[in-house]
Amino acid sequence: MKNNVRPKLEILLRARIMGGFQKFARTVVRASGHPMAFAIAVGVIVIWAATGPWFHFGNTWLLVINTVASIVTFLMIFLVRSAQNRESEAVQLKLDELIRATKEARNTLLDIEELSEAELDRIKTRFERLARKAREESSPVPTGLNPRVNDEVGAVVAPASDRG
């Protein structure tokens, strides 16, 4: 019985740690993109520059800003990448659900992100051919219609007088 409890505890602990990290990463990424974060960064640089005369613009004074910037950049790379991976996976799952739920969609595209570059290129070429063929087969707009663009959706629509 003890052997069965230990793996469950480890899985629960791992899930809590990962969940905590993901929440922390999302919070930091959102906060770092806020205008106030930019203002704080500018403030730190202004304070650092203002202290230059006090430290006689020495090597230590230069080293402080370089070290802090390097450490912050290094850590932010991992936090931003983690948040991007999670958001990308969520979007991919939503797209997969839309493909799965649409009758005319090709279910073979559900895991397209897992394909090799050569396979993706082959599918892209096929879709480009289909798009060219669809454009060639589409009928041109009748000359007397005088189409205009609907600003909301970017679609070409006939003037109100021609729509009956």
Image (cartoon, rainbow, N blue to C red):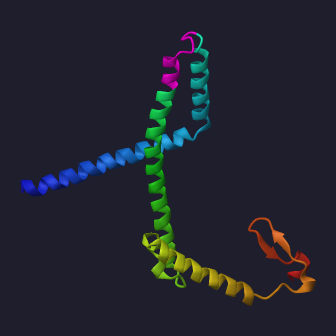
- Does the stretch in magenta take in 58? yes
Q: Is residue 87 above or below residue 118?
A: above
Determine whether, in the image, residue 135 is placed left or right of residue 4.
right
User: Which span of residues is magenta-colored?
Assistant: 54-65
Whether 149 is among the magenta residues is: no
Q: In the rendered view, does 157 fall on the left or right side of 129?
A: right
* Residue drawn at point x = 49 percent, y = 23 percent: 63
Residue 159, horizontal then vertical, whole percent: 88, 76
Where, quadrant-wise, is the C terminus in this rendering?
Answer: bottom right
Depth check: give the residue in front, 160 or 151. 151
Q: In this view, does 117 lie above or below 139?
A: above
Could you tell me which residue is drawn at 56 percent across and 9 percent down? 54
In the picture shown, does residue 92 fall above or below 32?
Answer: below
Tell me the quarter of the picture where residue 43 sits: top right
Image coords of residue 147 (percent x, y): 87, 77
Q: Residue at x 47, y 34 (%)?
A: 70
Residue 21 left/right relative to 81: left
Q: Where is residue 20 in the image (x, y as percent from the top left)?
A: 36, 44
Q: Residue at the location (57% across, 20% down)?
A: 48
Above or below 114: residue 7: above
